[in-house]
Image (tube, rainbow, N blue to C red):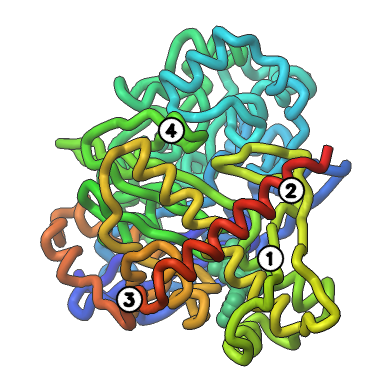
Amino acid sequence: MKYVIALDAGTTSVRAFVFDLRSGRFIRGAQQEVGQSYPQPGWVEQDANEIYFKSAYVLNDCVNAVGAENVAGIGITNQRETAVMWNRETGEPVCPAIVWQCRRTDAFCAAIDGETCKRIKERTGLLPDAYFSASKIKWNLDHIPAARRLQAAGKLCAGTVDSYLIYKLTGGKAFVTDHTNASRTMLFDIRSLDYDAELLRYFSVSRDMLPEPRACTSRMGEAVFGGVKIPIAGVAGDQQAALYGQACLSEGDAKITYGTGLFLLFSTGEKCVSSENGLLTTIGYTTAEKTVYALEGSAFHAGSSVQWLRDGLGLLETSAESEQLARSVPDTGGVCFVPAFSGLGAPYWNGEARGLLSGLTRGTKKEHIVRAVLESIAYGARDLADCMQRDSKIRLREIKCDGGACANDFLMQFQADVLGISVNRPCERESTALGAALLCAVSLGLTDEKEIINLRKSEKIFTPAQDRSRVEQGYRDYRFAVERALLRK
Ligand code: ADP
């Protein structure tokens, strides 16, 4: 069998790709947009049925293109944390899926007592927040009578998107999840690799409602396409799949995804490192033999700041144009930008902070502002990287990059300058889907970690070129601007 299919069930679209095991490349893709609804300010919902039907549609497209008998397996990666609740007997959702971005449980999470907060951090590696699945599941149990009724009858299932898709694709035979997705529920003990009984109690969740957690390289079940059974083997949440797809398999390996937001994941190998600097400890990936941990930090706004320049201020026609404008000036002319449009994430964790553009003079041109925005993305990554190195006492050697904005050579070069290490851009930029395909191939014994490392080819490596003292001065100016953004209360 020559192919593996990767399903990437993202927030705004679901995509499937055919991965050719001989060439190590994707040869076909299919995509469907997925809708979101915003029933109240700060609330974000999706229809799990739509996610499933569109996933099945793109999978069908790819399977049919190469013939089901030629497909060795399906790997799945997905938007994390989003909570789906469904009826175990019918497979039908009992309420809308509460999406990771949804803030409806902010007040509940803010009221979690100190003891429980401590337990959450110790056991799950997370910081108590509405972002993770636990409070979303609890919200449904408290507000959707049908959910409570099904729970009492032992017929309720609750899980992240991966578990719902696997359940549906296997005709309800497999009720499972992988360890990386489980590690985002805020109910999962990342050391014992099992749900934590006390946290289950706190969030009113019964164990039988939750999918069985398995290693990322497990056989999860079988999907049937045109009468042919295809194993689903290889599952990980999107950021972890990207880490794997970038071949960040060893301690000290790290990747940054420059999408709407920015996600830095830093592998700490088999060491589970707890953060003193507001980062999350998470599972990088698991196999039958080992658990690899990672530190995770994210900035809410990266590519979205460039979108704001384009759509909000009208300074750009396209996001890509930011590169040429930034290059047309030697520096920002003293302009500094802090992309705190909706507060600041790690390591500041301040929801009240708001964006700031400082150092404006009568000589400020739009090019300076565009450059300051791109520089702020790199400085945000520097904040996270510094914390990770302090927490883990492991030195970063290199950063692997992916996501839409990694196409920007100015930004990648500036990132290398600001971090003082090289930034390595791969030929295959669909790291997330690649991670799912590779986890599946490993699970089926079709490849191994050594081959994965050889498979990854660099398209371009950006090495630090700027004078250090100049870069450090720029970073100090940015930190000073952040302090001012934090003052806004
Ligand atoms: P997501 O998966 O979060 O939707 P993508 O990885 O598709 O995001 O990246 C899209 C983001 O990258 C957009 O916010 C866009 O503004 C930004 N982007 C795309 N190309 C460039 C570029 N050449 N320079 C800067 N930003 C870019």
Q: Which kind of residue does numbered mark 2 sit on?
A: Arg
**Residue under circle 4?**
183
Instruction: Tell me the number on the disc at residue 336.
Output: 1
In contact (CB < 8 Å): disc 3 and disc 1: no
Q: Tag 3, which secondary structure? A: loop
* Mark positioned earlier in the residue sequence (3 or 4): 4
Q: Which residue occupies 36% across, 36% down?
A: 391
Picture coordinates of residue 399 (x, y %)? 34, 63
Picture coordinates of residue 236 (x, y %)? 39, 48
Q: Quadrant of the C terminus?
A: top right
Image: 440 above or below 413: above
Ligand 1 within 8 angstroms of badge 1 C-beta: no
Rounded to the nearest angstrom, the CA distance separating label 2 from label 3 is: 32 Å
In contact (CB < 8 Å): disc 2 and disc 3: no
Q: Nearer the viewer, residue 179 or 308?
A: 308
Rounded to the nearest angstrom, the CA distance separating label 3 from label 1 is: 24 Å
Q: Tag 1, which secondary structure? A: strand
Image: 296 above or below 330: above
Q: Nearer the viewer, residue 450 or 57?
A: 450
In contact (CB < 8 Å): disc 4 and disc 1: no
Q: Which kind of residue does numbered mark 3 sit on?
A: Thr
* Mark positioned earlier in the residue sequence (4 or 1): 4
Q: Nearer the viewer, residue 283 or 177?
A: 283
**Residue under circle 3?**
463
Q: Which kind of residue does numbered mark 4 sit on?
A: Ser
For disc 1, the neighbor class at 10 Å (few under 14, some 14 to 19, many from 20) is many
Foreground label between 2 and 4: 2
Image: 299 above or below 429: above
Q: Which kind of residue does numbered mark 1 sit on?
A: Cys
- Residue 175 visible, this orientation: no
- Does residue 78 appear left or right of residue 41 in this picture? left
Q: Tag 4, which secondary structure? A: loop
